[in-house]
């Protein structure tokens, strides 16, 4: 139950049901100035089902002018096995 699973769980909002990715896209389109556009993939209830705890655990998005800024937060970096996935 790693990254894709956590991001794909649907949650209910007053605007409808969204997974985290769809919610980010909705918010970027309808309220790009919001400081609440983020994802969280560190779910304590699922840690016992993972081989490793997630290295990357959240992303925050904000729009400045016509530019999208994305901040990836991670607790560690597996240089030998996952470096190519974590570097954008």
Image (tube, rainbow, N blue to C red):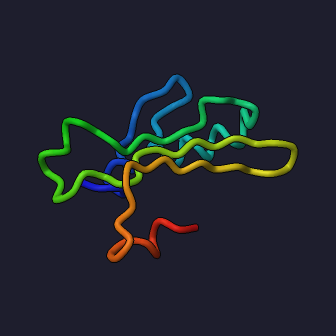
Left or right of 61? Residue 74 is: left
Above or below for 22 versus 77: above
Left or right of 67? Residue 82 is: left
Name the residue located 38 percent from the left edge and 71 percent from the top edge: 79
Left or right of 13? Residue 57 is: left
Name the residue located 37 percent from the left edge and 55 percent from the top edge: 76
Name the residue located 33 percent from the left edge and 42 percent from the top edge: 42
| Front one among 85 and 32 | 85
Image coordinates for residue 35, horizontal then vertical, percent: 66, 29
Quadrant where the N terminus is found in the figure? bottom left
Image coordinates for residue 53, horizontal then vertical, percent: 25, 51
Left or right of 40? Residue 16 is: right
Please tell me how many numbered marks the rendered image carries: 0
Name the residue located 75 percent from the left edge and 32 percent from the top edge: 33
> Which residue occupies the extreme top position in the image?
14
Quarter assignment of residue 28: top right
Image coordinates for residue 31, horizontal then vertical, percent: 72, 32
Above or below for 57 versus 88: above
């Amino acid at each position: 139950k790693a990254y894709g699973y956590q991001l794909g769980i649907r949650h209910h909002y007053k605007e409808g049901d969204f997974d985290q990715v769809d919610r980010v896209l909705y918010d970027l389109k309808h309220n790009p100035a919001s400081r609440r556009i983020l994802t969280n993939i560190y779910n304590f209830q699922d840690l016992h089902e993972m081989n490793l705890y997630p290295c990357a655990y959240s992303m925050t998005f904000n729009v400045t002018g016509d530019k999208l800024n994305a901040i990836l937060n991670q607790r560690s970096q597996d240089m030998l096995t996952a470096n190519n996935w974590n570097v954008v």
